[in-house]
Amino acid sequence: MQAFTTHQGLVAPLDRENVDTDLIMPKQFLKSIKRTGFGPNLFDTLRYLDHGEPGMDNSKRPLNPDFVLNQERYQGASVLLARKNFGCGSSREHAPWALLQFGFRAILAPSFADIFFNNCFKNGLLPIVLPEAEISRLFDDVNAKAGYRLSIDLDAQKIVTDDGRELSFDIEPFRKHCLLNGLDDIGMTLQKADKIKAFEAERLARHPWLVGQPGV
């Protein structure tokens, strides 16, 4: 998992509440057994004017000119500004995969659905909860200025806005540690690799008959 320490990026505003995971990553794209290739279909029903299916050449599909991520001023955005209850709906890990693979590293919103919130941390995407009034002010600022950027310092738990304001945010210490060090669940386990190998060696020494047994 890619570590998150500091990040400065262009902000894209998605001005709608209760964005669910099927809108983030529509169900027809969940058939893949890979963890890659979801970025082109992020917000598929909003980004394109036709119906998307796996295997389509997205470069030839008609884009919706009114959708924020298709607008020239937000090309290359890596910070998503959202409204309350972002990521509600079914518990699909494909949603944060698609956001990351599109290029987003952080999402700012007044609230997130719990499962989506947890999945973000497990995949290196930083969800930041800010007061609703502050989120609304950021929407106004982003809409008023093309090229609006934010700087995020995870270690300091601080955001610096384009006009120099500093915003603090909370994060659970264990999640912060994992993001700073790029540790997903597998990475956490591999930190104990020496102890796991020692346990397996001792186990086989005590039960040598286990060697070669299928499923052991």
Image (cartoon, grey):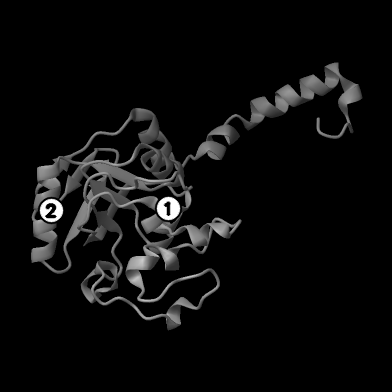
Which residue is denoted by mark 2 in the rendering? 138
- Which callout, 2 or 1, points to the residue nearer the camera? 1
Q: Please give the name of the residue rendered at 37% of the width and 58% of the height, measured from the top-left corner.
A: 23
Q: How many marks?
A: 2
Percent position of residue 209, x then y: 91, 23
Percent position of residue 63, x then y: 34, 78
Q: Please give the name of the residue rendered at 44% of the width and 64% of the height, measured from the top-left corner.
A: 39
Q: Is residue 204 left or right of residue 197?
A: right
In the rendered image, which quarter is residue 84 located in?
A: top left
Percent position of residue 55, x then y: 55, 72
Label whose residue precedes the other's in the sequence (2 or 1):
1
Q: Please give the name of the residue rendered at 44% of the width and 83% of the height, measured from the top-left corner.
A: 60
Q: Is 207 located above or below residue 16 in the figure?
A: above
Residue that sits furthest to the top in the current view: 206
Q: Please give the name of the residue rendered at 24% of the width and 48% of the height, measured from the top-left corner.
A: 108
Q: Mark on residue 95?
A: 1
Percent position of residue 123, x then y: 45, 46
The kind of secondary structure element at disc 1 is: helix
Q: Look at the image and tell me whether residue 158 can be seen.
A: yes
The kind of secondary structure element at disc 2 is: helix
Label 1 crowd (10 A; few <14 / some 14-19 / many >=20):
many
The reply to whether callout 2 and callout 1 are in contact (CB within 8 Å) is no
In the rendered image, which quarter is residue 167 located in?
A: top left
Residue that sits furthest to the front in the current view: 51
Q: Look at the image and tell me whether residue 162 can be seen.
A: no
Q: Amino acid at mark 2?
A: Leu
Q: Amino acid at mark 1?
A: Ala
Q: Is residue 62 left or right of residue 187?
A: left
